[in-house]
């Protein structure tokens, strides 16, 4: 277990392990979508980011870019990729996109409310088809962002049900969260 990761990346790694542990393994497309829908719900409910990664508008929907790169680099390059591939494995040649956990998540890095939101997203989206997930994730936040552009947290929160009157509070909280991240 790599403990040299920055806190935000460690939290992301543990959330991925949480999803994989709860599902018994999942293809990375579904992991990305579960993280996206969980982020959407969390932003709308708590006005804070749960997933410390940028979601980019790619052709098949929002993708957490650091995590996508870490998976694609298969243990090379970034510290996140190295740590990730120490704790997961591919299901093999017949299902290379399916990720299996090599350990359970460290719950010290996942808040109780984050786990509840992840559980809801897992229950709702883990078994959906690729086509359904693509359709569901191609909402206003995705369509209002240029191809490969970063989808704003504000757009994600609005799509998740935050009313427009809550936007100033969300922006303030996101600024504070960015400052906290720099301090830690």
Image: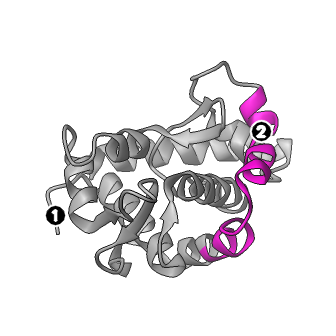
| Sooner in the amino-acid sequence: mark 2 or mark 1 | 1
Q: Which mark is residue 138?
A: 2
Give the number of marks.
2
Question: Farthest residue in the front direction?
Answer: 94
Residue 94: within the magenta? no
Secondary structure beneath dot 2 equals: loop
Question: Farthest residue in the top direction?
Answer: 146
Q: Which mark is residue 171?
A: none
Secondary structure beneath dot 1 equals: loop
Q: Position of residue 113 (x, y in %)?
A: 58, 76
Decide whether the magenta segment is chiefly helix, strand or loop.
helix
Residue 141: within the magenta? yes
Residue drawn at the location 83% of the way across and 53% of the way down: 161
125 horizontally vs 77: left or right = right
Q: Position of residue 20 (x, y in %)?
A: 46, 71
128 horizontally vs 172: left or right = right
Which residue position is annotated with label 1?
3
Q: Position of residue 163 (x, y in %)?
A: 85, 48
Report the span colored magenta: 119-143
How many neighbours does mark 1 have within 10 angstroms: few (below 14), some (14-19), or many (20 or more)? few
Distance between the alpha carbons at the discs numbered 2 and 1: 35 Å
């Amino acid at each position: 277990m790599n403990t040299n990761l920055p806190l935000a990346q460690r939290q992301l790694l543990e959330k991925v392990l949480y999803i994989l542990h709860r599902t018994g393994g999942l293809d990375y497309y579904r992991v990305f979508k579960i993280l996206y829908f969980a982020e959407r719900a969390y932003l709308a409910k708590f006005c804070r980011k749960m997933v410390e990664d940028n979601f980019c508008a790619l052709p098949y929907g929002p993708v957490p870019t650091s995590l996508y790169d870490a998976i694609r680099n298969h243990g090379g390059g970034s510290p996140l990729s190295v740590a990730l591939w120490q704790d997961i494995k591919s299901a093999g040649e017949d299902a290379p996109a399916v990720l299996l956990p090599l350990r359970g998540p460290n719950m010290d890095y996942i808040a109780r409310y984050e786990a509840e939101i992840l559980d809801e997203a897992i229950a709702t989206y883990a078994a959906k088809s690729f086509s359904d997930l693509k359709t569901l994730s191609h909402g206003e936040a995705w369509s209002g962002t240029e191809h490969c552009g970063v989808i704003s947290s504000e757009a994600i929160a609005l799509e998740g049900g935050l009313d427009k009157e809550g936007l100033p509070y969300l922006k303030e909280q996101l600024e504070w969260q960015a400052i906290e991240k720099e301090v830690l």
